[in-house]
Image (spheres, helix red, strand yellow):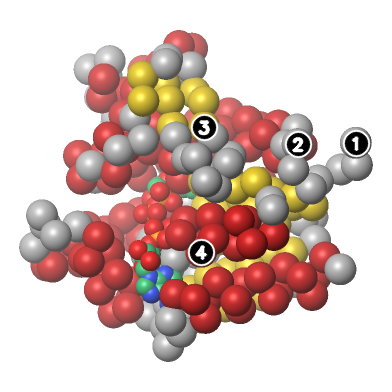
Amino acid sequence: MSTPIVVAIDGPAGSGKSSVSKAAARKLGFAYLDTGAAYRAVAWHVLNEAVDPSDEAAVIESLEDFGYVISTNPDEYFVRVNEEDITEAIREPRITDVVSKVAKIPVVRQYLSDLFRHIMATTDKPGIIAEGRDITTVVAPDAPARILLTASEEARMARRSAELPQQSQDQTASALRARDAADSRVSDFMTAADGVVTVDSTDFSYEQTIDAVVEVIRSRTS
Ligand SMILES: Nc1ncnc2c1ncn2[C@@H]1O[C@H](COP(=O)(O)OP(=O)(O)O)[C@@H](O)[C@H]1O
Ligand SMILES: Nc1ccn([C@@H]2O[C@H](COP(=O)(O)OP(=O)(O)O)[C@@H](O)[C@H]2O)c(=O)n1
């Protein structure tokens, strides 16, 4: 079988990476890899084992029984750890609040980046869209299509608030700001690296953003 086409998409929280990548993958018949889900799953696993997410050695040790499975089918998305379905649980604020702590540990990043490269190389689809914070720069810097998906802070906060009606807008905004600040100390996902195409979705509708991303992918891979 021929080598799959890899599409790398990075950007800050709420820019639309997950929803747009999933929709673009559907349109192109590609697989979809949500890399943030793996960092969230590590955070879930650590809390589930009553490990302190700030204790780097203990977090690293917890990787020994991290039985992680993610679906790359955009029509049937699920995330499991040791056979427990945690698709919904990893979106809870208690996970979002600590995920940056485990994501800044270099051994965790190396472990997950190797896993992502393996998933990308072994997909049975003609291509795979992988999205996160460091896919265009670290995980797949040689991908033929690399996109930085951005949106103004205001737009991103409004979108995330709409998804989290149980939290006040202020709570959602300050959590998002704090996470972006912590994450940007680890990866630069606010400026496009050389060869990375920026798609700014601030003034686009959701459908327009999908079309813009699909257009970049088509132009870079045909
Ligand atoms: N123009 C747009 N582009 C991308 N997403 C949009 C747009 N307008 C509204 N949205 C909504 O904003 C949310 C973005 O969330 P998500 O895809 O999880 O972003 P990220 O993965 O970057 O955190 C989704 O619910 C999406 O439907
Ligand atoms: N490639 C990636 C993807 C996510 N992450 C981490 O994982 C967290 C969750 O990522 P996510 O993509 O689910 O976040 P959202 O932007 O969807 O809220 C981020 O806040 C980062 O700490 C990372 O470090 N590198």
- Foreground label between 2 and 3: 2
Q: Decide: marks 1, 3 in contact (CB < 8 A)?
A: no
Q: Decide: marks 2, 4 in contact (CB < 8 A)?
A: no
Q: Amino acid under label 4?
A: Val
Q: Is residue 175 left or right of residue 206?
A: left
Secondary element at tag 1: loop
Label 1 packing within 10 angstroms: few (<14), some (14-19), many (20+): few
Mark 1 CB lies closer than 8 A to ligand 2: no
Sequence-wise, which precedes: disc 4 or disc 3? 4
Secondary element at tag 4: helix
Q: Position of residue 219 (x, y in %)?
A: 79, 75
- Give the residue at the far bottom of this rendering: 203
Q: Amino acid under label 2?
A: Asp
- Give the residue at the far top of this rendering: 65
| Residue labelled with disc 3 | 70
For the N terminus, the image quarter is top right
Q: Position of residue 105 (x, y in %)?
A: 45, 35
- Say which of 29 and 115 sits in front: 29
| Residue labelled with disc 2 | 124
| Residue labelled with disc 1 | 1
| Residue labelled with disc 4 | 20
Sequence-wise, which precedes: disc 2 or disc 4? 4
Vertical order, 13 against 99 (above or below): below
